[in-house]
Image (cartoon, rainbow, N blue to C red):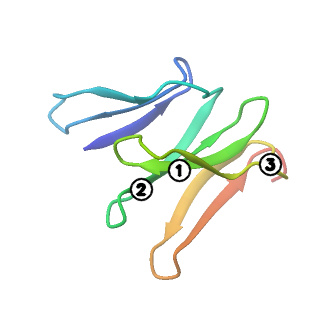
Amino acid sequence: NLYWTDTGTDRIEVTRLNGTSRRILISENLDEPRAIVLNPVMGYMYWTDWGESPKIECAYLDGSERRVLVNTSLGWPNGLALDFEKDKLYWGDAKTD
């Protein structure tokens, strides 16, 4: 599957690689979704939101069980990366460099 964020429509979507079965997973309480990264082994997706209240969130790959991971000391969180070995999530912040 292919997952993406759409800042223009404030949604997170998924489709099969052949373009079928496109679905909107999350469309509420997103302001400016940006980066997205997946952990297919654990079944999670993580994304950043640059909105008025910047945050990093996660949910299951089907969009359920959504929760905020980080919502303090963020400017424009972006560039997510997962370290599977150490079970850590890294991000860059374009506002704080």
Is the residue 82 above or below the residue 49 in the image? below
Label pair 2/3, CB-CB below 8 angstroms: no
Other residues around mark 2 within 10 Å, as few (<14) / some (14–19) / many (≥20): some
User: Hey, which quadrant is residue 8 in on the image?
Assistant: top right
N-terminal-most mark, 2 or 3: 2
Q: Residue, x 47% and y 47% (percent of image)? A: 65
Residue 58 is labelled as 1
Amino acid on which disc 2 is placed: Tyr
Residue that mark 2 sits on:
44
| Discs 3/1, front | 1
Amino acid on which disc 1 is placed: Cys
Amino acid on which disc 3 is placed: Leu
- C-alpha span from label 3 to label 1: 16 Å
x and y percent of residue 41 in the render? Answer: 32, 67
SS at badge 2? strand
Residue that mark 3 sits on:
74
N-terminal-most mark, 1 or 2: 2
Residue farthest to the front? 65
x and y percent of residue 27 in the render? Answer: 49, 24
User: Hey, which quadrant is residue 30 in on the image?
Assistant: top right
- C-alpha span from label 2 to label 3: 22 Å
- Quarter of the figure with the N terminus: top left
SS at badge 1? strand
Q: Please indicate whether residue 82 sits to the left or right of residue 51 in the image.
A: left
Q: Nearer the viewer, residue 78 or 57?
A: 57
